[in-house]
Amino acid sequence: MKNTSVTFKEAKVKEKKITMLTAYDYSTAKIIDDSGINGILVGDSLGMVCLGYEDTLSVTMEEMIHHSKAVAKGAKNSLVVTDMPFMSYQTSVYDAIVNAGRLVKEGKAQAVKLEGGTEVAEQIRAIVNASIPVMGHIGLTPQSVNTFGGFKVQGKNEETAKKLLEDAKAVEAAGAFAVVLECVPAKLAEYITSKLSIPTIGIGAGVACDGQILVYQDMLGMFSDFTPKFVKKYTDLGEEMKVAFTKYIEEVRDGVFPADEHSFKIDDEIIEKLY
Ligand code: KIV
């Protein structure tokens, strides 16, 4: 069954956990989709895990569109949500609508995600009014890394915990269909989840969220620059890939690969005529 922004909201009512992973290309999206996931996020984490940037700030609209289009081709049943990159919506409500529209029209996204609470509520409302479903994202919002002074847990004191609750309510009131809570203490995430009618999707926000999301390279052990505390490595594909790549290199050097079964045949007569 096709997942939509509506089925996400219904899942909260039915108390069914929502599952999400990121993807950035057609083949991975297809594998994740075939596994029965509810939603695929084309995250701007693209910048870090695929393009090798230090953070998400330099990711462009063109890059998001390029990868979103590829993911959408591979995602049959999952909801494709694409991140609005830094400065594609903060600048004005007009920019937010135009750029969300591009992600849908050119990037084939079925929803967009943007970071922030009260300060971007107007943008969320305007995009939703343009018939584009919006997923919010509060807590550790990586596009604000320079303001936070690093990738740190958010909402640990009374003032910041109250601000997070206020942000979550503002995102909901603006019409978002779901909200990501990133790096938020588990009990605070549980409280916020209980106060919202839209689903919360946690990443480093404990088990009480209505759903969970992880960056796929993190959970498969493919990204070794750093591993956040909230990541569970379900396998070490990075190591498995190295074993396979090393074997390939050895076999090529030893003349073992390609074998007969990987090669194409031609009649000897034709070759003889070339001499
Ligand atoms: O860009 C991303 O991958 C994200 C998730 C970590 C939620 O925003």
Image (spheres, helix red, strand yellow):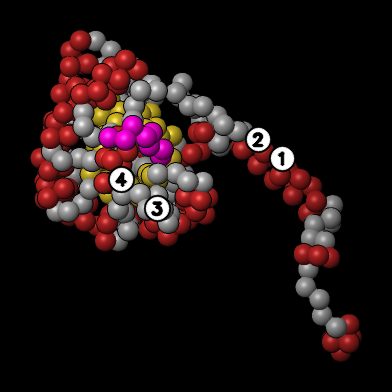
Tag 1 and tag 4, C-beta contact below 8 Å? no
Query: Label for residue 7?
Result: 4
The residue mark sitting in front, 2 or 3, is: 3
What's the magenta region?
A: 13-20
Residue 201 visible:
no
Label 1 sits on residue: 243
Residue drawn at (13%, 38%), measured in percent from left and top? 174
Tag 2 and tag 3, C-beta contact below 8 Å? no
Residue 235 visible:
yes
Residue drawn at (39%, 56%), measured in percent from left and top? 72
Tag 3 and tag 4, C-beta contact below 8 Å? yes
Label 2 sits on residue: 239
Amino acid type, callout 4: Thr
Residue drawn at (12%, 50%), measured in percent from left and top? 129
Tag 2 and tag 1, C-beta contact below 8 Å? yes
Is residue 63 shown above or below 169?
below
Quadrant holding the C terminus: bottom right
Describe the element under mark 2 as helix, strand or loop.
helix
The residue mark sitting in front, 2 or 4, is: 4
Tell which of 61 and 208 is nearer to you.
208
